Image: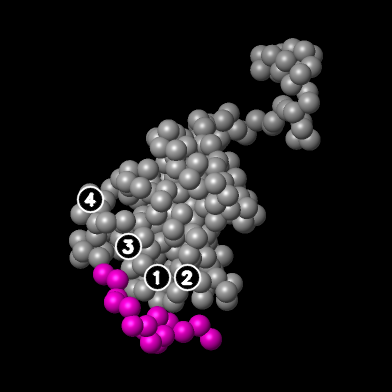
């Protein structure tokens, strides 16, 4: 049986956060109280499937999605949360923080760690490692994490000491790249590019075009005939 932290007899102080920050976190995580997440737009990007596969492979404790703003990183994160809830993951094992919307973080030292501590104690109610050993992993999703000073140091400490599944997004390629160096072996990165033709079509009520490139490799792109055929295909 998994004991709650209140039953574990811990002598450590109970982690607390400023009331305003707690209210903001509850607003960003409405599923904690049985409320639905915000309605998400239209068809899903292929990005969502890429992230899910990377998370399921467990190649690294952190999956990072980087790319410019307005390419669907935040939407993908919320759609992944919808999937987790639909699959039966308890709401109290899912934490999402959109850091660029939380001005109150400036007064907090090591905000990623402090929020994780608070969530572990007050929402999950059980130590992360105890949950993981029971196969009931906590899922931590951090959006625009690069706005937090020292984010990579905090994440390194977190995943080195707690078994959690973590997804982060960032719109500053330079900051994410700098952080990735110190997280070697702990982070797997996905590039979020602009919308593809197969994603744009459904947004305008068009049929999804069939991929022209074979699915069994990229060898065709070195063949001049492939590019000639592709041009003719695009003119049809």
Residue 120 marker: 1
Decide: is 12 above or below 162.
Answer: below
Residue 109, x across and y down, in percent? 27, 56
Mark 1 → mark 2, Cα distance in angstroms = 7 Å
Q: Residues within 10 Å of mark 3 (few under 14, many from 20)?
A: some
Of mark 1 and mark 4, the one earlier in the sequence is 4
Residue 236, x across and y down, in percent? 68, 16
Q: Residue beneath label 2, please?
A: 128
Whether pointer 1 and pointer 2 mark residues with C-beta atoms closer than 8 Å, the reply is yes
Residue 65 visible in the shown view: no
Mark 4 → mark 2, Cα distance in angstroms = 26 Å
Name the dominant secondary structure of the magenta segment.
loop
Of mark 4 and mark 2, the one earlier in the sequence is 4
Whether pointer 1 and pointer 4 mark residues with C-beta atoms closer than 8 Å, the reply is no
Residue depicted at 34% across the width and 73% down the height: 122
Q: Residue beneath label 3, please?
A: 114
Q: Residue beneath label 4, please?
A: 106
Q: Nearer the viewer, mark 1 or mark 3?
A: 3
């Amino acid at each position: 049986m998994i004991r709650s932290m209140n039953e574990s007899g811990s002598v450590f102080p109970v982690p607390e956060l400023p009331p305003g920050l707690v209210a903001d976190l509850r607003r960003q995580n409405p599923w904690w109280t049985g409320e639905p997440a915000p309605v998400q737009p239209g068809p899903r990007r292929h990005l969502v499937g890429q992230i899910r596969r990377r998370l399921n492979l467990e190649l690294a404790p952190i999956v990072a999605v980087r790319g410019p703003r307005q390419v669907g990183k935040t939407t993908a994160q919320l759609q992944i949360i919808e999937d987790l809830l639909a699959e039966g993951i308890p709401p109290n094992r899912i934490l999402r923080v959109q850091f660029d919307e939380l001005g109150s973080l400036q007064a907090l030292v090591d905000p990623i760690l402090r929020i994780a501590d608070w969530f572990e104690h007050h929402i999950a109610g059980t130590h992360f490692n105890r949950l993981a050993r029971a196969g009931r992993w906590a899922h931590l999703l951090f959006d625009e994490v690069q706005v937090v000073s020292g984010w990579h140091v905090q994440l390194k400490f977190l995943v080195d000491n707690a078994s959690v599944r973590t997804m982060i997004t960032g719109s500053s390629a330079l900051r994410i790249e700098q952080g990735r160096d110190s997280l070697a072996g702990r982070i797997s990165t996905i590039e979020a590019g602009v919308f593809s033709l197969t994603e744009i079509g459904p947004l305008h009520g068009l049929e999804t075009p069939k991929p022209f490139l074979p699915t069994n490799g990229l060898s065709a792109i070195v063949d001049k005939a492939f590019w000639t055929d592709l041009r003719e295909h695009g003119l049809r």
